Structure formats: C-alpha cells, structure tokens
C-alpha cells in the first residue's frame, strides 16, 4: 500500500504548473477500504481540479476514532534526489519516496491496523479520513469544517512527530503589503513619492509591533516560546535614478495558541495605515495564505491522556501547522502523532525509517482497541 501511494503523484502547489489532483490516490484508498469492509464516501473539494476528500467508516455510533491524513505532497527537487521520488525504495533500513514521512505512509499504516476488524465487535466506529491540499490551502480540511459534521469524537493526525504526541502548534499567516507611490526623476524628490521610503516606515512599525507581540505572548511549551514575524521578501523600483513608484513586502507571522489570526490581520493593517497616514502613497493588502489557526487540544482530553499513556511521552508542541485546528473546531478532539520525522519532510530523499513501521501499526491497534472496541 505504501508503494502504491508513493507511486501515485499528488503534488499540491501554489504554482498551477506543478499542481496536481489527488483523485487517483483517493481511488486507491477507496478500493482498499472497501475490501476491508468500510463504508466509503468521497467528497468533492474542487472537483474541476481533481481534489477530493475521503471518509471511510467501519462500524456505527456517534463517537469513535478518526485516523486522519492528507493525501498531497509538496513539489520535489528532482536533481537533488538520489532515489526516484515516485518509486518506493528500500535501502539503509529506510523507505525512500515523496510522502513517506509527510505523510502518505501513515494512511497505509492506518489501513493495516484496521485489517481483520469485525465491525460487529466495535462499540464505536473507526474512521479513516483522507484530505486534499493540506500543503497549500488546507482546502480539504476547510471543506470538512464547512460541512459542519464531526467525523468522530477523537482523532489522530499522522503527521511526522517521531511517534511522540503533539497537542499544540503555532498558527500561520502570510501577507503581502503593497505600496503605490509615484515615480519621477531622482534629481528632484518633489517629482515623485517614494514607495520604498514609505515601506521603510512600515518596516519600522512592523518590527516595533513584533517586539510588543513577543513581550506580551509567551508559552514555554514551544522551542521558540513567542510568536514570530518574518519579513521574508521585498521588491520595488526599477532603476537607481528613478524615484521608486511601487514596493511590496511579504511577511510570515506565526502566532501562539489563543492569538486570533483574523484579529492579528486587522491589527497589522491598522498599524500600517497609521504609519502612512501623513504620506501621499496608497497601500493595499493581500493574503498570500489565508492562514492556519494555532492548535491547542485540552491536556485532559481522553485522546491526549491515551496518547501519553500509550507512547510514554508527554504531549508536546511544534512549530509546523496541521489540520488539527479544523478538527478541533468541529468538536473532534485531536492529537498529532505519526511515524515520520519533521526533519525529513519537504526534503530530497525523504524517508521513513523501517523500524517505525511495525511499532506504529501496533500503536494504532492499541488506540483502536481503547476507543472503538473497549468503548
């Protein structure tokens, strides 16, 4: 199953030239789930672009356990891979391929853990959830949330955590600030309105705001215990002897739990406008990425307590984002727990260590017994 998933490309990308649908991956999963006795529902996310979610259910009831994963991968740097990214290769006690760690393999391991289950023995249902476009827009998770029906009472998202449970992660938003000035000959500043100099004001204001945010918001559970704001890309002007007529800054902001992405976006815009209020430039804003809210599952949730007991590790916090916040907002209490490692994600020669495969299947079987069979 892992070989089949890795061998079926399903790249999602903000670049339309690289973007692919995930229909073939969904069809593979649907066939395997049907063979195992699951009721399978395929839900369109963006059917015109071949994007779908899948929900497979074994058993019945209002609670149950969801084993969840996204079916897409990031693009790949072909010239930097030593193995074919779309052919599962076993070498060095590892399984190489695009999506082995992040995170197609988890879906295969989830199905393996469900093999042989008799739905008549389940007090609560087991659900396999596979989503689209996690790596770009979270469209699959957003579609699921918009539907408003929780897929189950508890969920495990199999993102790469090294088999250690995670209950918190930061949020993320990416914004563009575009300033329109007026170009002119550089010999006379009165002939134009420099967008670049106006952006200098904006950058100063953003750095001051960052200092305030970091002073007011701390959480020692994170390796970087404060929100980050990175000024990642700037471009403007076209020649040194012309007053810069337009300038754009792109930034990435990663808030802690309890910091609202929409409120942060509103504050950012207010502060930028205030910094430019006595200038003649025009400013507009654009969301490069709508944003992922931070995740925070109650430490006393049954799924968190079970994950800590079964793994022997306390539930921690990570900086990368997942679909967990969307499941939590549906009322599905979620832990992030998978066999891969984040250090291999989005990297050439991505791999999953072979010695994680059987332990992860055994761990998932314990979760299934606890939440679906023992009730």
Image (cartoon, rainbow, N blue to C red):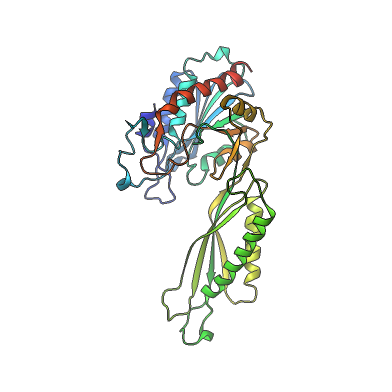
Instruction: Count how many numbered circles sit on residues in the image.
Output: 0
Residue 277, position as x, y percentages in the image: 65, 73
Q: Quadrant of residue 216?
A: bottom right
Q: Which quarter of the figure has residue 276?
A: bottom right
Quarter of the rendering containing residue 282: bottom right
Q: Residue at x 67, y 52 (%)?
A: 217
Q: Residue at x 48, y 39 (%)?
A: 132
Residue at the image position 67 percent from the left and 60 percent from the top: 212
Q: Which residue is found at the position 39% from the left and 45% from the top?
A: 75
Q: Position of residue 85 (x, y in %)?
A: 34, 39
Return the residue nearer the eye: 335 or 220. Answer: 220
Question: Where in the figure is residue 220, as x and y percent of width and height?
Answer: 64, 45
Q: Is residue 150 visible?
A: yes
**Looking at the picture, how far across and down is residue 87, in whole percent?**
32, 34
Q: Quadrant of the N terminus?
A: top left
Q: Is residue 71 left or right of residue 58?
A: left
Judge by depth and name the residue closer to the eye, 69 or 200. Answer: 200
On-image quarter of the C terminus: top right
Is 79 positioned to the left or the right of 147 in the image? left
Residue 60 shows up from this direction: no
As drawn, 98 above or below 57: below
Q: Is residue 186 above or below residue 260?
A: below
Q: Nearer the viewer, residue 13 or 297?
A: 297
């Amino acid at each position: 199953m892992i070989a089949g998933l890795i061998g079926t490309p399903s790249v999602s990308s903000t670049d339309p030239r690289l973007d692919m649908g995930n229909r073939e991956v969904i069809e593979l999963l649907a066939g395997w789930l049907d063979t195992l006795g699951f009721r399978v529902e395929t839900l369109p996310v963006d059917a015109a672009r071949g994007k779908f979610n899948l929900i497979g259910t074994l058993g019945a009831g209002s609670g149950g356990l969801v084993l969840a994963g996204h079916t897409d991968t990031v693009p790949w740097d072909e010239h930097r891979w030593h193995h074919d990214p779309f052919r599962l290769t076993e070498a060095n006690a590892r399984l190489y391929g695009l999506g082995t760690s992040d995170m197609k393999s988890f879906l295969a391991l989830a199905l393996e853990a469900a093999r042989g289950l008799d739905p008549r023995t389940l007090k609560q249902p087991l659900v396999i959830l596979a989503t689209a476009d996690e790596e770009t827009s979270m469209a699959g998770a957003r579609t699921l949330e918009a539907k408003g029906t929780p897929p189950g009472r508890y969920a495990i998202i199999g993102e790469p955590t090294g088999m250690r449970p995670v209950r918190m992660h930061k949020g993320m938003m990416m914004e563009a600030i575009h300033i329109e000035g007026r170009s002119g000959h550089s010999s006379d500043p009165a002939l134009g309105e420099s967008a670049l100099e106006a952006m200098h004001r904006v950058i100063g204001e953003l750095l001051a705001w960052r200092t305030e945010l970091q002073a007011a918001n701390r959480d020692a559970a994170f390796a970087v215990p404060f929100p980050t704001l990175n000024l990642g890309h700037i471009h403007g002007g076209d020649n040194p002897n012309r007053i810069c007529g337009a300038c754009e800054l792109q930034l990435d902001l990663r808030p802690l739990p309890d910091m609202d992405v929409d409120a942060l976006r509103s504050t950012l815009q207010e502060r930028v406008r205030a910094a430019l209020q006595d200038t003649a430039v025009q400013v507009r804003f654009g969301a490069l990425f709508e944003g992922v809210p931070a995740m925070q599952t109650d430490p006393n949730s049954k799924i968190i307590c079970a994950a800590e007991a079964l793994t022997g590790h306390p539930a921690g916090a990570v900086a990368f984002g997942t679909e967990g916040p969307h499941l939590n907002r549906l009322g599905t209490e979620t832990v992030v727990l998978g066999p891969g490692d984040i250090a291999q994600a989005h990297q050439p020669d991505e791999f999953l260590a072979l010695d994680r495969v059987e332990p992860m299947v055994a761990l998932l079987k314990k979760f299934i017994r606890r939440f679906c069979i023992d009730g």
